[in-house]
Image (cartoon, rainbow, N blue to C red):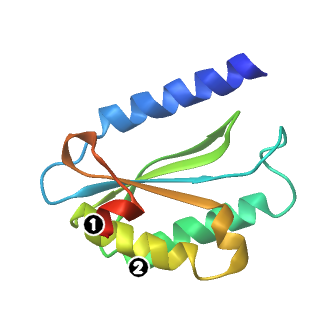
């Protein structure tokens, strides 16, 4: 199991590196932070679909680059034609929209693969 998790992390990292955004754009990685060995308990896929739909709805021009699942659970990458900081602000609103949304993991990357976190927004 551990080797499958590590392989999934490596594959996700390779996807992130293959899709680095150009200046003025961002890459959004959507996944779930589900504790424990079972990464798709009842309701998880519905929560994941909701998070992706919220991102697409709040981020004009967002387009999917990859969607699937692995040992870590469901995963999607979206290209967003907006500044990474703007995208992260929208993602914070999605994560705060409902209690279960805290399990949605919305990671934003800017040009050069730089991850934008809450601290970067002040």
Residue at 28% x, 72% y is 86
**Residue tagged by mark 1?**
85
Vertical position of residue 4 compared to residue 116: above or below: above
Return the x and y of residue 32 as percentages of the image width and height. Answer: 65, 54
Return the x and y of residue 77 as percentages of the image width and height. Answer: 44, 50
Give the label, 1 or 2, closer to the camera: 1
Residue at 82% x, 42% y is 36
Vertical position of residue 47 compared to residue 18: above or below: below
- Name the foreground residue: 21 vs 118: 118
Q: Which mark is residue 40?
A: none
Q: Is residue 6 visible?
A: yes
Secondary structure state at the residue bearing disc 2: helix
Residue at 74% x, 51% y is 34
- Name the foreground residue: 119 vs 67: 119
**Residue tagged by mark 2?**
58
User: Is residue 85 left or right of 2 when viewed as pictured?
Assistant: left
Q: Is residue 61 visible?
A: no
**Residue 121 quadrant:** bottom left
User: Is residue 20 left or right of 45 when viewed as pictured?
Assistant: left
Return the x and y of residue 16 as percentages of the image width and height. Answer: 38, 38
The quarter in which the C terminus is drawn is bottom left
Vertical position of residue 32 compared to residue 68: above or below: below
Label 1 crowd (10 A; few <14 / some 14-19 / many >=20): many
């Amino acid at each position: 199991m551990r080797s499958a998790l590590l392989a999934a992390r490596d594959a996700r990292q390779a996807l992130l590196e293959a899709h680095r955004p150009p200046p003025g754009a961002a890459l959004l990685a959507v996944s779930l932070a589900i504790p424990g060995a079972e990464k798709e308990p009842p309701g998880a896929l519905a929560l994941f679909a909701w998070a992706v739909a919220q991102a697409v709805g709040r981020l004009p021009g967002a387009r999917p680059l990859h969607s699937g699942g692995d040992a870590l659970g469901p995963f999607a990458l979206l290209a967003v034609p907006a500044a990474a900081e703007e995208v992260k602000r929208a993602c914070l609103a999605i994560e705060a929209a409902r209690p279960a949304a805290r399990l949605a993991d919305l990671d934003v990357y800017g040009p050069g693969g730089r991850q934008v976190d809450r601290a970067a927004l002040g």
